[in-house]
Image: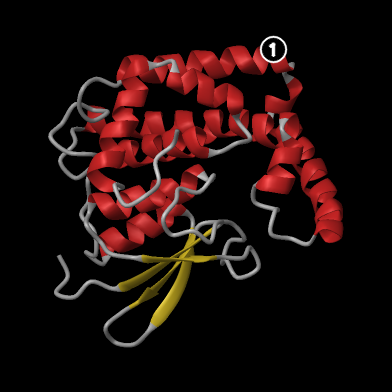
Amino acid sequence: MASKAPTLTVFRDRDDPGAYTWSPFVVKLEARLRFSNLPYTTRVGTLTESPKGKLPYVRIEGDDGQSSLLSDTALITKTLIKSRAIADLNAKLSPAQAATDLAIRALLEDKLYFMNAHERWITNFYIMRDQGPLSTIPYLPRLIIGQIVYRKALRTLHLQGMGRYSPAEISALRLETWTALNALVGEGWVLGGEGPTDADACLFGFLASSLTALANPETTAIVKGLPNLLAYAERVHEKYFSDYKKWD
């Protein structure tokens, strides 16, 4: 490890350092940092300041006084590993285990994410607008921005493919995916090793955000009905996030 850890600020979508955000990627990054015992502080970020126009992003300040902004959770993790600020949790995995770890992350980030986006931004749009990420915007501008975001979500989901399914078909896919993940998780970590891997940070990010967000009631009900996943989320919360408010 580096002789002196960098000063790290995580910019997220919520101004509440004692609570999970609704973003699975924010929670994923925070979990990854906590798995490596790297201290950080949180602040509210803006898409205009983020290098890639998305949340989360971080400011890394080295002991030489230099600072840099970096976004994308995968790139942030790789940069911190390269600088030896955090451990490479996947370093000891076999090639087959590394492939499984990558496949789990892809299932969550490239498939389940779009199911969640449909449930939140299409089915429960008004909750997202008035109680979620847009809620801090004054009401009249929020109405205009909300419609822009809604149309963008419709277009993105249609181009990606998830928006071409019916609500019933998306619900079936959602249940199938979460049920498969429930079967994968046992009493320990996702891959069954002595410690977490990158897949654990990703899975917990999706679990915690799904259990706390108000705009995905169907997902919340599914997760609460899957005992392995719920027990897993509770274990990670108690060990690494006991300072955060837990879901109901």
| Scheme of image coloration | secondary structure
* 13 to the left or right of 228: right
Circle 1 sits on which residue? Answer: 168
Residue 80: x and y, percent? 31, 62
Q: Nearer the viewer, residue 193 or 100?
A: 193
Q: Is residue 217 above or below residue 139?
A: above
Image quarter (top left, top right, bottom left or bottom right) of the C terminus: top left
Q: Residue at x 54, y 57 (%)?
A: 14
**Amino acid bearing label 1:** Ala
Give the residue furthest to the front. Answer: 248
Q: Residue at x 74, y 16 (%)?
A: 166
Q: Is residue 19 above or below residue 99?
A: below
Q: Is residue 34 visible?
A: yes
Residue 59: x and y, percent? 43, 71
Q: Secondary structure at mark 1?
A: helix
Q: Residue at x 20, y 54 (%)?
A: 87
Residue 232: x and y, percent? 30, 28
* 188 to the left or right of 69: left
